[in-house]
Amino acid sequence: MADNNQQDIESTPVAQQSVPNGSAQGKENIANGHAPEPAQTTAPRIPSISAPSDKPSLADNATVDGSTTPVKTPFIHPTLSSTRATRPPLTADQQTKYNSLLNKAQFWPSVPTTSKPDAPDSPLTDSERQWLTRECLLRYLRAAKWNEAQATARVQATLVWRREYGVEGHTAEYISEENETGKQVLLGYDNEGRPCLYLNPHLQNTKGKEKQIQHLVFMLERCIDLLPPGQETLALLMNFKESRKGEGATVAQARQTLNILQNHYPERLGKACVKDVPWLVWGFFKIITPFIDPTTKEKMKFDEDLTKIVPPAQLLKEFGGDVDFEYDHEKYWPALNSLAEARRKEMRERWEAGGNRVGESEEFLRGRGESVSVKDEKAKKEKMGNESLVVENPKLRRTPSFQDDVKS
């Protein structure tokens, strides 16, 4: 389902114990906000990055296990000096298109289970409804250059793809062997708070091409789990210094990966920094360049001074930073997945507290700002001029259906 207007790449899933999705039981249950309680997990409690002041209370550059020299587990949050650019407010036309897409998404009762023409439909799960955030819908609208029909089709296509590809079914245990050599490492944040995903092709340890792509999708999902409030994009840092012929992706693999990233992770790439590119890899880049979206090309940087992009205190030494990192799969892999699982659990709890809304705010889900339920109540209060109208605590309420909101 390629789109000539595809935008850039933008993050399968879950840690060793996934949160159950739960099935939507028709409009009545959705309206009443009934949802299953999140699963109880045995993952260790990971410190939260959430803070009303948007400044973590933890020590700067804290890691999951407290390791420093060498670092062996992921950093818990960006440096305190990181800043995130803010997007300009929507124009009146953009707001109208967003409202229309949100209205449609509120009423999607089901989607096909696969992309086959005769595939049966099944109801949207709670995790799929949670995935349909305000920012998610806006990313697809921007990727479609604000063509609402295209954005609608692309969101629905991604919902089907996520089911068919098994994004929520690839466990940390299943993917584990792919990362035993540390060929992909999620560690640290850049100057704008983007999670940094390091790709090391020279550490390739498997031959299953399809599972290698599943591995990349899994790590992109973990990047999304660890995004701080207010940030939607990630940074890719690729090191080809020791790569030899046959260790990199094939052209077919690259095309499949680009198709997944451009169609199903739009507006997710903030930076793509490539280091020490040998002539063989340069040739590979020239071959795949026609398949890369122009917006993505603009975000690709070759052999740049990465200390201007990533704080040295969270940048690996081989990329010019100060971080002495030692990959130990037995320490890093469970730490990464426990941290990501804790973030997902926190977001799920906030989503339920806010009323199980399609179109929920990602900032609220990540621990900053207000739920759309509270904002809606405040807007109604301001419009009605009723000072006695009480804004309910989102933890104690379930919002009405979208139909009731429209009637109000």
Image (spheres, grey):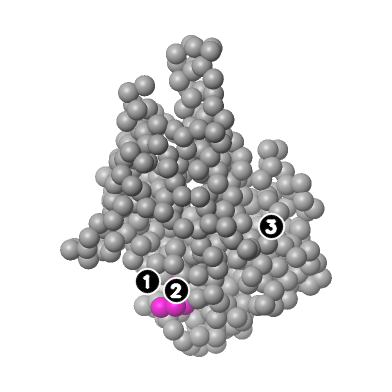
Residue 92 left/right relative to 391: left
Magenta segment includes 269? no
- Identified by mark 1, the residue type is Gln
Q: Which residues are magenta?
A: 210-214
Whole-percent x and y of residue 11? 49, 60
Residue visible at 32% across and 30% down in the picture: 403
Helix, strand or loop at label 3? It is loop
**Which of labels 2 and 1 is toward the front?**
2
| Disc 2 to disc 1: CB gap under 8 Å | yes
Is residue 99 something that shows in the picture?
A: no
Task: Tell me the residue that label 3 is attached to.
Answer: 46
Disc on res. 256: 1
Magenta segment includes 213? yes
Whole-percent x and y of residue 123? 31, 52
Residue 25 left/right relative to 8: left
Disc on res. 213: 2
- Classify residue 396 by image quadrant: top right
- Identified by mark 3, the residue type is Ile
Helix, strand or loop at label 2? It is helix
